[in-house]
């Protein structure tokens, strides 16, 4: 068996920022009872905050066995419970995290420099070569301007073949976007083709609006289906109070409403989570009218927090904030999922399931039913992101830590195609399945050759660029807790 990529898989964190008024602490808090000149001051501060806020605080080792002279990052991870995170390929990856303020988590690809595309790194076994398959390309990005598109295969970088999994550090160095570096890439149009063209792309800041594709599709039976590719739960590029992206979402739903859409397909296959307020807004526009003003989810904190079960509501006031949107009053929702669908995306699935028929199409989700806060101090350069809350729907259901599987009969794997259509193309593999089901009651695609390469080509996934994306936090605002 060939070695899998040695790069440490970075989990997609679902950060939950809360206000002190909610009894859970706040970001940028000032700690005045700790002396930063004492060698173990920062680790004592970390311990104190974790014992107060951590969901599994009762599993933190006793103070007398802790080494307060460790470096802060190592010390932080000695405090974590085995319940925190996931085991993958024999390695445990916690959800709680610590980082220096200068390396604060980013919500989306547009932060900093970017080439403007996401990819899956594969070993193509029968061809004995390594390549990057392009998952999607941001509009007005270096990759878009170079003509890169979903389904293209990058087999060469800077005049050399894409490194194998034993040289993953070399690959990550080549794809590094911490500086505005330039890549020369060799592109093949399909997995089984040779390089047909080259392009040069230079990293630069790129706007990554999560409302990636939104369109109304007319079906053969006269029905209209709304389709939305929503790639992260971020309200705007500047801060949690910036409504730029939310207003794009509202505008899209206003158009869906004007088009009298009665079926809806929400594509979350690339969405690793983000803001609770964005999930709340999106769910409010999708839900039946009868569900409005009812509970969307509960956030349950540890027993040190007074009134530790906080409700979040389907709030119709959010629809008219900024740009007017529309509630579609749907009775059924199709959600496209994958292993990269996590946290706030799963909140949509769990939170809306009690109110409407929800059909999951694609692959099994991550299974992230917990949330965290950010804790910082003016005295220290570190930020803590401990898991502090468990997520449940209005019926109290939160048992999805192993992920939501596809609805039986709606499993759909698009990873072995010979023709990757663009997202939103009615002939795109998963979308085509759903449209046929809506129109004809038959969950089958119309393109008979779509999986021809499944028998001819074996592709082994090694690393996905979505794995290193981090959300910028699930910010719980006072409006999220309004009482109807």
Image (spheres, grey):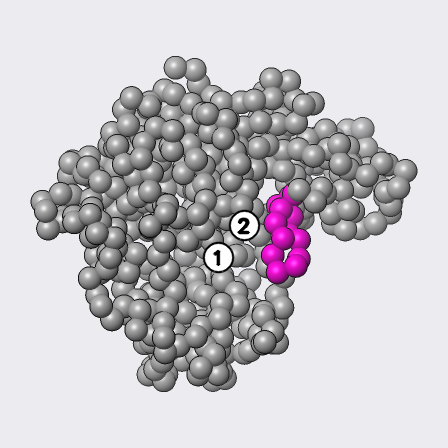
The quarter of the picture where the N terminus appears is bottom right
The quarter of the picture where the C terminus appears is top left
Q: Is residue 141 above or below residue 388?
A: below
Task: Give the residue number, with chain letter if any, for mark 2.
Answer: 12
Give residue 117's position: percent from left, percent from top.
41, 63
What residue is rendered at 60% in x and 17% in y? 307
298 is within the stretch colored magenta: no
Compared across the picture, whether 97 is left or right of 480 comes to: right
User: Furthest-right residue in view?
Assistant: 64
Give residue 178's position: percent from left, percent from top.
55, 62
Q: Residues within 10 Å of mark 1 (few under 14, many from 20)?
A: many
What residue is rendered at 76% in x and 36% in y? 59
Dot 2: what SS? Answer: loop
Q: Please report contact status of discs 2 and 1: CB closer than 8 Å, yes or no.
A: yes
Dot 1: what SS? Answer: helix
User: Furthest-top residue in view?
Assistant: 484
Say the numbered circle drawn on residue 474. none
Give residue 236's position: percent from left, percent from top.
41, 41
Q: Would you say residue 83 is visible in this rendering?
A: yes
Q: Is residue 45 above or below residue 119?
A: above
Distance of mark 2 from mark 1, alpha carbons?
8 Å
Task: Give the residue number, with chain letter if any, for mark 1.
Answer: 466
Compared across the picture, whether 153 is left or right of 273 comes to: left
Q: Residues within 10 Å of mark 2 (few under 14, many from 20)?
A: many
What residue is rendered at 44% in x and 57% in y? 205
What residue is rendered at 54% in x and 78% in y? 163
Q: Is residue 42 above or below residue 449?
A: above
87 is within the stretch colored magenta: yes
Q: Start and end of the magenta stretch? A: 84-96
């Amino acid at each position: 068996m060939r070695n899998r990529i040695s790069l440490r898989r970075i989990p997609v964190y679902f950060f939950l920022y809360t206000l002190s008024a909610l009894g859970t602490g706040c970001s940028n808090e000032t700690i005045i009872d700790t002396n930063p000149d004492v060698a173990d001051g920062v680790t004592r501060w970390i311990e104190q905050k974790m014992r107060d806020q951590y969901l599994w605080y009762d599993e933190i080792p006793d103070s007398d066995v802790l080494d307060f002279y460790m470096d802060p990052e190592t010390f932080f991870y000695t405090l974590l419970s085995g319940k925190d995170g996931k085991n993958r390929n024999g390695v445990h990856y916690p959800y709680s995290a610590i980082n220096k303020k200068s390396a604060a988590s980013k919500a989306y690809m547009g932060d900093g420099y970017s080439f403007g595309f996401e990819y899956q790194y594969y070993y193509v076994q029968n061809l004995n070569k390594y390549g990057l398959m392009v998952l999607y390309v941001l509009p007005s990005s270096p990759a878009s301007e170079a003509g890169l598109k979903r389904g293209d295969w990058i087999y060469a970088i800077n005049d050399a073949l894409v490194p194998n999994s034993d040289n993953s550090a070399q690959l990550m160095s080549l794809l590094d976007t911490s500086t505005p570096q330039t890549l020369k890439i060799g592109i093949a149009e399909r997995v089984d083709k040779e390089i047909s063209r080259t392009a040069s792309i230079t990293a630069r800041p790129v706007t990554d609006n999560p409302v990636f594709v939104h369109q109304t599709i007319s079906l053969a039976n006269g029905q209209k289906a709304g389709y939305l590719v929503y790639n992260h739960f971020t309200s705007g590029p500047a801060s949690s109070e910036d409504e730029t992206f939310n207003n794009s979402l509202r505008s899209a739903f206003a158009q869906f409403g004007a088009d009298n859409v009665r079926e809806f397909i929400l594509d979350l296959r690339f969405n690793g989570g983000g803001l609770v307020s964005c999930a709340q807004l999106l769910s409010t526009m999708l839900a039946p009218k009868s569900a409005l003003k009812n509970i969307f989810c509960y956030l349950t904190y540890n027993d040190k927090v007074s009134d530790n079960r906080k409700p979040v509501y389907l709030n119709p006031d959010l629809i008219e904030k900024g740009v007017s949107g529309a509630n579609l009053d749907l009775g059924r929702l199709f959600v496209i999922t994958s292993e990269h669908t996590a946290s706030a995306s799963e909140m949509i699935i769990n939170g809306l399931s009690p109110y409407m028929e929800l059909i999951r199409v694609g692959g099994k989700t991550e299974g992230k039913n917990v949330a965290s806060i950010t804790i910082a101090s003016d005295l220290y350069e570190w930020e803590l992101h401990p898991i502090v809350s468990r997520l449940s729907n209005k019926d109290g259901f939160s048992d999805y830590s192993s992920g939501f599987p596809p609805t039986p009969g709606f499993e759909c794997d698009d990873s072995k195609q010979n023709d990757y259509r663009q997202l939103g193309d009615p002939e795109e593999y998963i979308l085509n399945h759903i449209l046929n089901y809506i129109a004809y009651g038959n969950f089958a695609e119309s393109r008979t050759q779509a999986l021809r390469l499944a028998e001819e080509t074996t592709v082994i996934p090694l690393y996905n660029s979505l794995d290193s994306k981090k959300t910028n936090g699930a910010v719980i605002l006072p409006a999220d807790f309004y009482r109807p």
